Amino acid sequence: MSIDITVKIGGEAGQGIQTMGHMLALVCREAGLYLMAINDFESRIRGGHSFFQIRICDKPVQAPHHKVHLLVALNRETYDLHKGQLASGGRVIMDEIDGSGEGDLIALPFSELAKKAGGMIFANTVAAGACLALLGTPFELFKKVLSKQFGKKGADVLEKNYYAAELGYQVVKEVAFKWSFEWRADKPKGALMDGSKAIALGALAGDCRLAAFYPMSPATGIMTHLSLLSDRFPLIVEQVEDEIAAVNAIIGASFAGTRAMTSTSGGGFCLMTEGLGLAGITETPIVIVNAQRPGPATGLPTRTAQGDLHFVIRASQDEFPRFVFAPGMPDEAYEITSRAFHLSEKYQVPAIILIDQYLADSMYIAQKPYVAPERIERFIAQDDDMENPQQYKRFAVTSTGVSPRALPCAGKALVVISSDEHREDGHISEAIPDRIAMVDKRNAKVPFMIKEMNPPKEYYGESGTLLVGWGSTEGAVKEAVDRLRDEGSDIGCLNFVDLWPFPADAAVDALKKTKQFLMVEQNSTAQLGQLLREQTGFVHSGAILKYDGRPFYPNEIVDGVKKYVR
Amino acid sequence: MVGIKDYESLYKNQWCPGCGNFGILEAMKDALVSLEILPEKLLIVSGIGQAAKTPHFLKCNMFHALHGRALPLATGAKLANHDLKILVNSGDGDCYGEGGNHFMHAIRRNVDLTLLVHNNKTYGLTKGQASPTSDFGMVTPMQPRGVISEPFNGLAVALALGAGFVARGFSGNREHLSRLIREGMQFKGFSLIDIMQPCVSFNRINTYNWYKKRAYDLFEEDYMPDDLENAMKLARQWGDRIPIGVLYRKEKQNFAKHIDVLNKGPLISQQYDPARLQAVLDA
């Protein structure tokens, strides 16, 4: 890669770190560059330490980098915490009131310049200006982004921001930066996208009409995006009293005929498991997004993890079919979400989308245009489809396990549903044949559901060693593979997206080609590795596991692999 | 024309002989017939408990859901299709115990549905434990030294939270109860009818006769249910005289009316528009 620069902006919560980071991301996008940015913050509103780390590349990039080329320290603590990550020749810009003197440190009068521009509120624009100037960004490009961001706030605000930016540019005019590069005017390569937004858009592409939720990090962003769009679609986004209400409300909405979803994190999902079982036994389609964070209980609210795989595939008492998907990137999250609505309705089962804080909050450049489906295929039975609507049985036994699904009050057919075990007509039954028939009927869907599952994605799948992961680690694993291959290793990777019902045959086909495989997961017990052993008999020969709440950096995977492969 | 027969269920009833639920079931049928609601135009959502089995013993659309969770499920259904006519059957344990939080928030939302709380002051289906509404001191096999908590007053809570239709019925007075259900269903907004109901198997204190001696009819007293303070006094009246009737009625904008997108019709009837979505995707 000719351009591969990481800029880290750090400071206290409330200092506008994300606003500034977003500004940089918009400038890069405008110039036709690729980027990948992570958000790292504590579970508090003010104070503490947060950072936004953006990696700027001229090729698609899907993982953060562990070395920092330019550190923007909005307080002294940031410098002390992160100076160890500086690449050789890396620089730090910091307000001179926070200190000066060290070799790599460029002390700048940010506060003074901000006041000159009109007040401390402009400190971010000054710092962003200095940062972009060091990177060699044409000033006009920054102005263009500022006008898009602040244009609506009036001429005065915009002019002051221009001025603040200019002050930032001027103050570093004489400073040399090793990685300054020539910015070519190119078209944006795609939309600026984070996982939360991609899922919100995917929900619209799945024709979701009710989103009920209770706020919980890191899942709230999905609902924020949906809520902002809700006035343009037949969509209601409702914040309810708890996660139990959320899951039951979407079951009610789906039963009445609209597609519906909720989003939560592990703790909220715990509260939803009873409702998940209700969707299971009443065969009501619903979509639940679980944005994972480390647990158990409150755990690390704003951090990332992949610790809920075993939980979501088995959650709730007894047995019933469900779908579980774990997209790796926002582009995939868009498609998986829309597909989850489709498959959930087609098979009348709940669908769970597993993401994590890392995917939810990280920014990427979308690598393909997102396309709205031409039409939404519904799986609803109407009176006209029935020989005798008055004899309608909601849980009629069929060869596929899927019964024609009518909607309440839509015709003569009465829809009778019970959370108790039931007869074909939906009324309670404790009769042995009814119980067996209903369990068998629900399970009969599984072979058909497995046929819908995509095999794991292979990247150099014919290699002697494979790294095996799932969901959001895809980008970091692939980059690790690239680097190891550059060093001469015979290595590739598999990424599982469609996780349940488990595509065991496809997994066997992919694994039998390799001599050994290593798990790469963000949990402490290699949950997918255990599942592979259970479902395929194949056993991983090692695991690179990270469960500190922070995302994988490719170099950590490279180092991990070297412990097993020489 | 709708007749009682239209509501007859072929499903065999499971209640104890003499159960207070029978009176409620008959009063419901009377009300539905007088409102001329066809079975296929009615949705009943219920929780879990003997009360929540009610819709099985009627002919209608029904979702017999989880313990305590009938109200959020009904809310979701109503948001999806606000043309639905929804009745909710719940019990004192189901609604005020397991579902207490949902009860409070359903009132806040003012969703247009009618909630019937079959209040027999005991847990019937699990065989006679105290319920949230059991009187202080009531002895049960599970509370052998008597209940040591104050009873939950659903009517007072509902009034405090701003419910627009708050009523108390008695399962032993079918005609009176069917009038309450009729008025509750005609009310535009959340309507609560707490129904005093004997449990012939497990509550030996609050029997038919116990209630009969105490209940007095607010309709006969020419009571005007338009004053919150008076309603609150009546909601708290318990002992020798217990008022039955509409305690409070005040219409206000219901939940669906606050949601602009529903002006275009029920969510289920609106069209998916790929162009509109594509415009957002391309923005």
Image: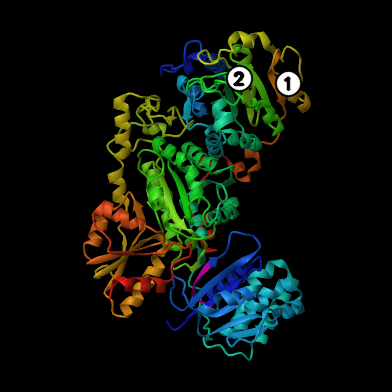
The structure's colour scheme is rainbow
How many numbered discs? 2
Front position in the image: A56 or A371:
A56
Label 1 CA crowd tier, 10 Å (few <14, some 14–19, many 20+):
many
Asked whether the beta carbons under mark 1 and mark 2 sit within 8 Å of each other, the answer is no
Left or right: where A304 falls relative to A92: left
Q: Quadrant of residue A11?
A: bottom right
On residue B234, which mark appears?
A: 1
Left or right: where A333 falls relative to A217: left
**Residue plotted at (58% across, 24% down):** B117
In the rendered image, the vertical position of residue B211 relative to residue B230, given as above or below: above
Kind of residue at disc 1? Leu
Q: Quadrant of residue A40?
A: bottom right
Front position in the image: A492 or A170:
A492
In the rendered image, the vertical position of residue A203 relative to residue A71, given as above or below: above
Considering every residue shown, the one lying at the far front of the view is: B145
**Residue plotted at (51% across, 29% down):** B45
Kind of residue at disc 2? Ile
Chain ID at mark 1: B
Residue B24 appears at what percent x and percent y? 55, 17
Judged from the image, the secondary structure of the residue bearing numbered disc 1 is helix
- Please determine if labels 1 and 2 lie on a single subunit: yes
Label 2: which residue? B195
Residue A66 in sight: yes
Residue A216 appears at what percent x and percent y? 55, 52
Indicate yes or no whether the magenta region holds residue A327.
no
Front position in the image: B160 or A56:
B160
Q: Main secondary structure of the magenta part?
A: strand
The region drawn magenta spans A31-38
3D distance between C-alphas at marks 1 and 2: 15 Å
